[in-house]
């Protein structure tokens, strides 16, 4: 059972690099608690509380290892693990996109996290925007993803966005 918190801690803290992909529907963030030497257990708990208290109905983790997924269970937060695969990017992306579409169709607010909010996750979100038909033009989908990322995406992220329509 999640701990009972009071005061300002009851609302948790916003995960690092939190970014809306689709306002009030789909967002991305850094792994709750951080990653590597920056990981903090207390911060992870506070960020998961924030996710729960802000109405996110589902969390999708794309990190390779299942580290800390048990914390979602302990905090009563629905989650799934969709580890990124360099060997089967298209299959991974299509599976992720189908899952996201299903949650969004049910009006479930979703947050996707990787170790960091980098080219991998932003390329996947740009590809999802194109795959779902929200932005059909590949150049425009890349521009949207790059604007959200705040920088030019690497070639593998751009390539995924370019071929997203083939994954439908």
Image (tube, rainbow, N blue to C red):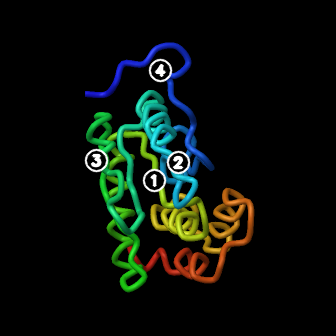
42 horizontally vs 91: left or right: right
The residue at the far front in this view is: 37
What residue did someone put label 3 on?
Answer: 70
Give the CA separation, mark 1 to mark 4: 22 Å
Marks 1, 4: nearer the viewer:
4
User: Badge 2 local density, few (<14 within 10 Å), some, or many (20+)?
Assistant: some
The x and y percentages for residue 42 are 48, 37
Pointers 4 and 3 in contact (C-beta within 8 Å): no
What residue did someone put label 4 on?
Answer: 10
What residue did someone put label 1 on?
Answer: 112
- Residue 28 visible? The answer is no
The residue at the far bottom in this view is: 87
52 horizontally vs 66: left or right: right
The x and y percentages for residue 112 are 45, 53
Give the CA separation, mark 4 to mark 2: 21 Å
Instruction: Name the residue nearer the viewer: 144 or 153.
Output: 153
The residue positioned 42% from the left and 45% from the top of the image is 110
The quarter of the image holding the N terminus is top left
Pointers 1 and 4 in contact (C-beta within 8 Å): no
Instruction: Name the residue nearer the viewer: 40 or 109.
Output: 40
Which label's residue is closer to the chain start, 1 or 3?
A: 3
Give the CA separation, mark 1 to mark 3: 16 Å
Which label's residue is closer to the chain start, 4 or 3?
A: 4
Pointers 2 and 1 in contact (C-beta within 8 Å): yes
The residue positioned 42% from the left and 19% from the top of the image is 5
Which label's residue is closer to the chain start, 4 or 2?
A: 4
């Amino acid at each position: 059972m999640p701990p009972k918190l009071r005061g300002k801690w009851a609302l948790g803290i916003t995960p690092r690099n939190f970014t809306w992909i689709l306002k009030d529907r789909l967002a991305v963030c850094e792994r709750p608690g951080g990653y590597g030497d920056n990981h903090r257990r207390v911060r992870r708990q506070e960020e998961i509380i924030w996710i729960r208290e802000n109405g996110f109905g589902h969390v999708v983790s794309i990190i390779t290892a299942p580290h800390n997924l048990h914390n979602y269970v302990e905090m009563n937060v629905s989650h799934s693990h969709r580890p990124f695969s360099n060997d089967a990017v298209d299959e991974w992306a299509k599976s992720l996109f189908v899952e996201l579409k299903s949650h969004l169709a049910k009006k479930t607010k979703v947050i996707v996290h990787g170790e960091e909010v980098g080219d991998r996750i932003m390329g996947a979100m740009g590809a999802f925007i194109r795959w779902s038909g929200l932005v059909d033009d590949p150049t425009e989908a890349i521009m949207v993803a790059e604007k959200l990322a705040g920088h030019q995406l690497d070639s593998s992220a751009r390539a995924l966005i370019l071929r997203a329509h083939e994954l439908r």
